[in-house]
Image: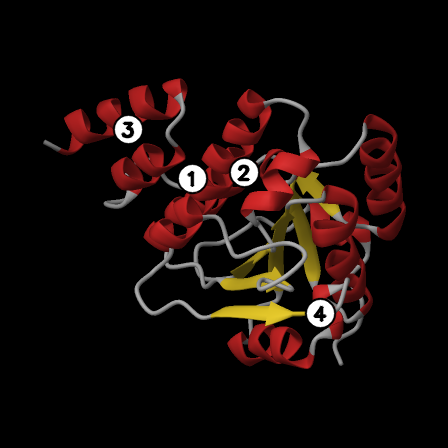
Amino acid sequence: MRRPTKPSEQQNARLKTHGEEPHAAGHRPRGFRVAHRTAAQADRLKHNVVALAKAATVLGILLVVTTTSADSMWGPTAPELVEALPAGQEIIDRSTVNAWRDDRVREAIEATGRPKLIFAGVSLEVCAALPAYSATVGGYDTYVALDASGTFSRAKRQAGLVRMQQAGVIVSDYATLMVEALADNAAPESGAVYAALDMPFAVLVGQISAAHQA
């Protein structure tokens, strides 16, 4: 087991293209509806997690994807996310609340040998935060994509943010995490990364990058 990294060291360590392991934890159709009060909020969450998966794939960042009780309580992975995943991507269905407590999930992450992990989930304070806490204890540098994770109430969200800060988990947004991993706008894949992010500023930057490479 690796020595747990101090938060100050984590904050000074840049995300690198081949040094992270994003873990899309449990984005299910029913979860989208339950975790957000309006259809617009649910659609925004879908947009963000799909964009995160697409950009990570462009960057060659490995994915570990899970569901929770897909055939019963929570339902299967959102079809928009399934479509965005690399061909043949395994989706691990688990019963544990904390994904890290499922041996298959933990072993899949450990097998990559990556020291930095990015988590996202339908519930920020549970699906994303709980495995992030466990991974931090295990010595990993852990990040949570805030806007690619939902919540069930404002209070739960605030409590989750405070607890993650106390645990040394780094919180950011999905686009910043992917741009940080990209590192260089002159990289050949930069245009595809910004297109995958699918945000107004990202489209503009991607167009500028493509023009410079032409």
Q: In the structure shown, which secondary structural element does the residue marked by tag 2 occupy?
A: helix
Q: Earlier in the sequence, mark 2 or mark 4?
A: 4
Please report the residue visible at 56 percent of the width from the left and 24 percent of the height from the top: 39
Q: Earlier in the sequence, mark 4 or mark 3?
A: 4
Decide: few, some or many residues near mark 4? Use Cα within 10 Å; few <14, some 14-19, many ≥20: few
Q: Residue 13: image x %, image y %?
A: 63, 51
Q: Residue 92: image x %, image y %?
A: 55, 70
Mark 1 residue type? Ala
The answer to whether 133 is drawn above or below residue 54 in the figure is: below
- The residue singled out by tag 4 in the image is 95
Mark 1 vs mark 4, CA separation in Å? 26 Å
Residue 59 in view of the camera: no
- The residue singled out by tag 2 in the image is 174
Which residue is at the front of the view, 71 or 20?
Answer: 71
**Tag on residue 206?**
3
The answer to whether 144 is drawn above or below residue 175 in the figure is: below
Mark 2 vs mark 1, CA separation in Å? 8 Å
- The residue singled out by tag 1 in the image is 51
Q: Residue 79: image x %, image y %?
A: 41, 49
Decide: few, some or many residues near mark 3? Use Cα within 10 Å; few <14, some 14-19, many ≥20: many
Please report the residue visible at 70 percent of the width from the left and 65 percent of the height from the top: 99
Please report the residue visible at 48 percent of the width from the left and 48 percent of the height from the top: 78
The answer to whether 163 is drawn above or below residue 118 in the figure is: above
Q: Residue 198: image x %, image y %?
A: 37, 29
Residue 206 location, quadrant:
top left
